[in-house]
Image (spheres, rainbow, N blue to C red):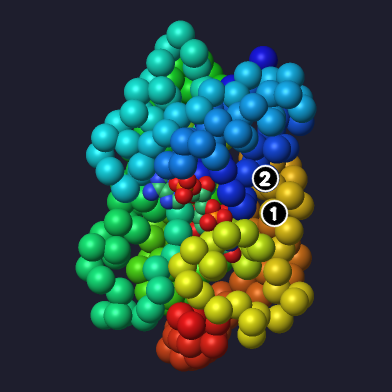
């Protein structure tokens, strides 16, 4: 039986990964800050699918929390075969409206934690000649969207580079770039979503199914939906200046309430 470790496992996209991987018979290590929610989730997945679900309470905006997950990933007696770096959040407000402490927290969770956890997992995976890492980025990586977009652009670049360096090792690394997904994300950030058209919303379970298929195919970047694939194709040929204007307007529409 293989083991998958998922950060931000208790809600949204992370919970969808947990459901799908448990249904496929993987043991799980579930990581988030809310210990009670983690315990409930572990019990439910164990009872429903008969898998072992470990809980690891960790705040990935703190060194101690990142360190605890690194320790679990480097435990040679209980190897982790698949790492899903999914924990993340949005900040309310545009540039200079967001407190610096929150900007730095975002870089810690979206970039430093992803770098450290990927590296902790990938070293052992390379020794064993197999393993996978999914780093959850966003389509915001491809457009100018403040610190959020910049942090997700880092995730994409870092993952693609690492995937190239690890080619032939048996270890697959993939950046996952979803569009809007119905989760707790926008509510937690205090963002209004009323003006986002219905067709732009993705379902977390379908997203995960496509993501895992793309990982199996060996993709290093996954944009898991034809609508967003088409949009990102358009983004590639749109002049950067024009793109900045459009995404800034869109940001104001669905941005802080
Ligand atoms: N929803 C979207 O439209 C969308 C689109 C593109 C990309 N994404 C990305 O997808 C990922 C998951 O987002 P989601 O939409 O599923 O959000 P969500 O529903 O709000 O879930 C976030 C998860 O991350 C955990 N988390 C947050 N901060 C953490 C921290 N400091 N340490 C440890 N765990 C933490 C939360 O649990 P606790 O609060 O218990 O810690 C929760 O399990 C994020 O990286 C996000 O940027 C989301």
Q: Is mark 1 within 8 Å of ligand 1?
A: yes
The kind of secondary structure element at disc 1 is: helix
Can you identify the residue that label 2 sits on?
A: 16
Residue drawn at point x = 36 percent, y = 42 percent: 59
Q: Residue at x 42, y 24 (%)?
A: 73
Contact (Cβ within 8 Å) of mark 1 with mark 2: yes
Q: State left or right for residue 238 relative to residue 124.
A: right
**Image coords of residue 233 (percent x, y):** 64, 73
Name the residue nearer the viewer: 208 or 237: 208
Rendered position, 97 above or below 77: below
Q: Is residue 140 visible?
A: yes
Query: Is ligand 1 closer than 8 angstroms to the Cβ of mark 2?
Result: yes
Mark sitting on residue 204 = 1
Question: How far apart in space, not on screen, are marks 1 and 2 (Cα)?
Answer: 6 Å
Quarter that holds the N terminus: top right
Q: Residues within 10 Å of mark 1 (few under 14, many from 20)?
A: some
Mark 2 or mark 1, which is nearer the start of the sequence?
2
Tell me the element at label 2.
helix
Residue 163 rendering spot, x and y as whole percentages: 49, 41
Query: Which residue is depicted at the point 56% across and 75% down?
Result: 236
Q: Position of residue 143 (x, y in %)?
A: 48, 74
């Amino acid at each position: 039986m293989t083991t998958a470790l998922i950060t931000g496992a208790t809600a949204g996209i992370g919970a969808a990964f947990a459901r799908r991987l448990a249904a496929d018979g993987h043991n799980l290590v579930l990581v988030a800050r809310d210990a009670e929610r983690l315990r409930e989730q572990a019990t439910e997945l164990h009872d429903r699918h008969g898998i072992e679900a470990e809980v690891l309470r960790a705040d990935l905006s703190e060194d101690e929390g990142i360190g605890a997950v690194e320790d679990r990933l480097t435990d040679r007696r209980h190897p982790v075969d698949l790492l899903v770096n999914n924990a993340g959040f949005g900040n309310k407000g545009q540039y200079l409206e967001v407190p610096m402490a929150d900007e730095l927290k975002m870089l810690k969770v979206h970039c430093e934690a992803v770098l450290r956890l990927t590296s902790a997992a990938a070293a052992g995976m390379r020794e064993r000649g197999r393993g996978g890492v999914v780093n959850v980025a966003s389509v915001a990586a491809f457009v100018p969207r403040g610190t959020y977009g910049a942090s997700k652009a880092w995730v994409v670049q870092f993952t693609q580079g690492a995937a190239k360096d690890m080619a032939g090792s048996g270890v697959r690394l993939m950046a996952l770039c979803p569009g809007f997904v119905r989760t707790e994300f926008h509510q937690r950030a205090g963002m209004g979503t009323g003006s986002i058209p219905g067709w732009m919303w993705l379902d977390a379970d379908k997203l995960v199914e496509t993501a895992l298929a793309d990982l199996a195919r060996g993709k290093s970047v996954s944009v898991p939906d034809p609508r967003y694939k088409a949009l990102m194709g358009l983004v590639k040929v749109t002049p950067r200046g024009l793109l900045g204007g459009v995404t800034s307007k869109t940001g104001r529409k669905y941005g802080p309430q």
